[in-house]
Image (cartoon, helix red, strand yellow):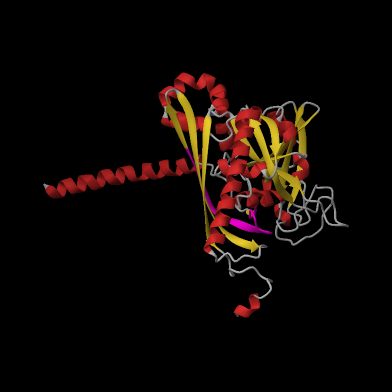
Amino acid sequence: MMTRKKCDSRLIGTRWKLPLQILALFSCLLVTGCWDRIEVNDLAIILATGVDTRDNQVELTAQIFIPRKAGSGSSSGTGSGEASQSGVTMIRTAVGSNVAEAMNRLQRKVSRNVFWGHCEVIVISEQASKQGLRQYLDFFLRYTQIREHAFVFSTSKKARDLLALLPPLERSSAESLREMSNLKLGTRVTVLNLAQSIEGPSRSAVLSRMLILKPTSGQSIYASDPYVRGLTLIKNDRYVKTVTEPMSVGVLMLLNQLNNIIMPVDIEGKEGAVSIRLSAMKTKLTPQISNNEWSMKIKVDAKGEVVLNTTSKSIADPHMNALIEQQWKKKLTGLAEDALKLSQKQLKTDFFGFSIQFRRHYPKQWKSHKQNWDEILENMKVEVRVNTLITSTGKSTDPQGVPGQSDRY
């Protein structure tokens, strides 16, 4: 009985084996493989894009990677900005009534399919920012190819000129800008950060302002690098003001983004000064509502090391060390208060995210008073407390070149 059942099952398996094989064969014929593939050689890869205005229209510039010259070691350049000295990039520009139309017209000037997935840098001129950033951000965040984590910079020049630079150190100006952002030389803002800032309760943003270094004598005007020079302040998605040092230092400090800086500090009652390299800084905002009065406490903890001493006193002296910390504290406090005055009294704009802190800690009160936020901000009492600490005096403690110092050795 068992043997008969086994035979029947084998016959059934054999009966269905051939039809299944035929079905599998026909299924393979229906599969066409990668029918919608796009080869790398058919792509124009965008490394950076710039936004300008021309005759009340949007001028869009794309920096395009040239793969055929990436490893050739070519060093020829046109000097016009159409190709870099390394032959790795070129730029193309198109104009439209809006950024989407400009992009569409840009495609007509390129023989390959334009691909924005590798665009890591976006430069927006201050002139374009005056027209409003919302239209650009809506497109950059809506278009599927563009990265929401691309870094955004501002410039008082033409964004096109910035992307047309031929950096002698990097392969492209896009790479130079990206490396500067990683070094935290200014603010580090992405497309997503920018959109969240201007659409959030503060309705403001702060961007790094880029300029162009003057080329050396005899070099092309494009044989240069971009560099950070101040900050661009955005209010309600539009450009309002440019600030440079020392005001920009205070703004970055309150944004908790002050890094990579050496600060000269004058010593009261002493001839000379001390330069301190900032090694760590943390800014903490603490909101408070008491008796219907809104206030903010700002605590700044700064650590640094002395890299230059032009006074005649030794930093190893505890009294001198304490005096340096006191003077550094005084300077940082003054910079913070100047930045607060600019934000609260002059521009009446919440650049430092006070509204975010109140919404987080006092959601009910914020919901009831957010319509009057501008008035609350202007009259808010803000207390700044700065703590400073010198963690190192460098490789030497005594000032160099002081008469009689050699007697100690």
Of residues 397 and 376, which is closer to you in this image?
Answer: 397
Identify the residue at horizontal 55%, vertical 65% (top origin).
Answer: 317
- In the image, the segment drawn in magenta is 265-285
Q: Is residue 272 above or below residue 408?
A: above
Judged left or right of residue 221, residue 152 is left
Q: Residue furthest left?
A: 1
Judged left or right of residue 18, residue 378 is right
| Image position, residue 313 (x, y; %) | 62, 65
Asked which quadrant contains residue 116, the reply is top right
Residue 109 in sight here = no
Asked which quadrant contains residue 167, the reply is bottom right
| Image position, residue 139 (x, y; %) | 63, 31
Identify the residue at horizontal 55%, vertical 32% (top origin).
Answer: 196
Q: Residue furthest right?
A: 218
Quadrant (top left, top right, bottom left, bottom right) of the C terminus: bottom right
Judged left or right of residue 12, residue 234 is right
Magenta stretch: dominant SS?
A: strand
| Image position, residue 338 (x, y; %) | 63, 38
Identify the residue at horizontal 80%, vertical 54% (top origin).
Answer: 223
Judged left or right of residue 69, residue 26 is left
Q: Is residue 257 magenta?
A: no
